[in-house]
Image (cartoon, helix red, strand yellow):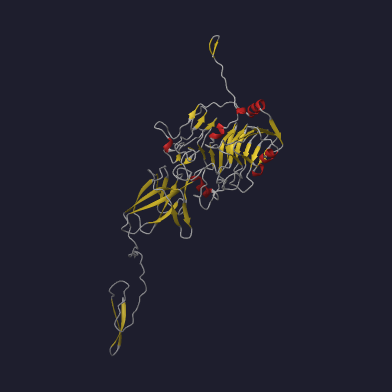
Amino acid sequence: QGCALVTGGYQRWCCKPCPGPGCPVNTPGGPTNTPPPPTNTPGGPTNTPTPTSAPLRSLDITVNILRAPRANLNTADNSCSTTASSTIYNEQTWVSLYYPSNIIKESKPTDNGVASFNILGVTANEEFKIVVSPADTSYSCICPNGCNYALTIPPIGTNSISRNVYLYNYADAWLQIFGGNVFAGSIFKSIVPNITCTTPTCLAGAFVPLPSKDSLTSGFPFLTAITLNSSTINTHKDADQYLANIHLNSQRGSAQSPDGFVLGFVPQSLSYQYFEQLAANAASINDVDEINLNTWRSDDLMSSPTNFFRVTGSQTIDQSNNVSVANGESVVIFVTGNLTIKDNAGGGNKVTSVSRKTSINSGGFLAFFVQGDIIIDKSVGEPLDLNNYLNITAVNFNNAHLEGIFFSNQNIEIEGGNTYPNRKFIGAGTFIGKSGISLGRKVDDGTPATEPNKILNTVQALENFLYRPDLLINWPEELKSSIINWQEVAPRSFN
């Protein structure tokens, strides 16, 4: 109720009901009185504030899971840039929806990379959250906020929203064979990221043709009679998954799967002693104190068609040992201990080299027969570029770090080291470890600090081997022997 002061000969107060609750009556020329806000009396009506937005009946939410070979987060504005593949991620990745943000609404696996939800009774401007859980640990969400996405309910009139979630490929290190085969007693493992490994810089196969020889069939692995994909042997993933491919698509026949193994391989029992005895029977072996081809040339020790040398104890070689075999030279080196090979010139350099046979050159030959281990030091190989993961060193003969035949009576170990990423190794020739071959190159140590380095694995193998068939052609006669197998086919009759 409002009152006004009226003057007209005498003063009086005139009061009358206001037009509405809490609304004063303003008399022209008179003061305006603002009453205090109304007080709700127990049992009386309660004033309800006017809502700022009306609720939506429902909201459709679609989450698309996309592969990305790389994605970058700009922390300044929390934006994401990516070169995402248009192919939808086809693993059964789980997507969880929280609405309100701390209460789970629904979780479901994606169907061919898509998860669809419908929320009833949502309110504009409220927040909800999407949490993505990749089914395969070789992938991870990295932008804009890892695998957690906070979204806002849109205003009335927008009844559906879509969110793309990008998964960065975290492939593990793998190996690649160019033009050759692999003979293994138990395990061969090289899981190729065939979505991100693409031409021309990367060939999506564990076995691929030699450089510039695309018309030639690539090699394949020979294994002893084992059960593939058993609990102790993991050779590959299913052919229709993104990490697979023993051979390139163009290298498969109509009856050949991408996982074409040859089983039942039985290795021959050749040894260091076997080859050393062959050399001793057919030629003289020069006993030397150290390995240095320039010294041997100056001492006139390399005049024979094939020159055999033996050094006692463990040895370490690098560029200073001048292990470079020229056209027409043939060198065989026996080491009674271990052989360690290093790069003393900053990495990415040739440590051993052999002239290749061509239509006009006879080429050369180099072989190391080592009674102990062959250790390829972490310094041998090409440094990788973290600032540009597509800066890839081509795998070819010119870029090979080691060339020749490397035979260990024990193990061949390619060391990685604890500086990440390790270097990319390229070997040309034949590498044999009777007891095993250890491939230790990695780009990360499994910690969050180095895990982003795994982008380097998506476009190139860390250990690469090129077959040199010309070394087989130039194999020394002294190291050849005929194998005769006598078998009785009838009583008192032999063939």
Query: Residue pushed farthest right?
Result: 289
Question: Foreground residue, 22 or 54?
Answer: 54
User: Which of the 4 quarters of the picture holds residue 81?
Assistant: bottom left
> Can you say whether 433 is above or below 48 in the image?
above
Q: Quadrant of residue 411?
A: top right
- The total of numbered circles placed on residues is 0
Estimate the x, y position of residue 152 in percent, counting from the top left: 39, 57
- From this viewpoint, which residue is outermost toward the front? 360
Direction top: furthest residue: 492
Front residue (pair 314, 184): 314
Query: Quick check: 458 left or right of 376?
Result: left
Q: Please identify the quadrant where the N terminus is shown.
A: bottom left
Q: Residue furthest bottom?
A: 9
- Compared to residue 8, the image places residue 354 above or below, namely above
Q: Is residue 243 visible?
A: yes
Question: Relative to the observer, which residue lies in front, 76 or 99?
Answer: 76
Q: In x, y percent, where is residue 263?
A: 49, 28
Picture coordinates of residue 413 (x, y %)? 60, 38
Residue 67 horizontal/vertical position (percent):
43, 47
Residue closest to the eye, 226 or 389: 389
* Quarter occupied by the C terminus: top right
**Quadrant location of residue 274?**
top right
Is 339 left or right of 143, judged from the image as shown? Answer: right
Tell me, yes or no, if residue 239 can be seen here.
no
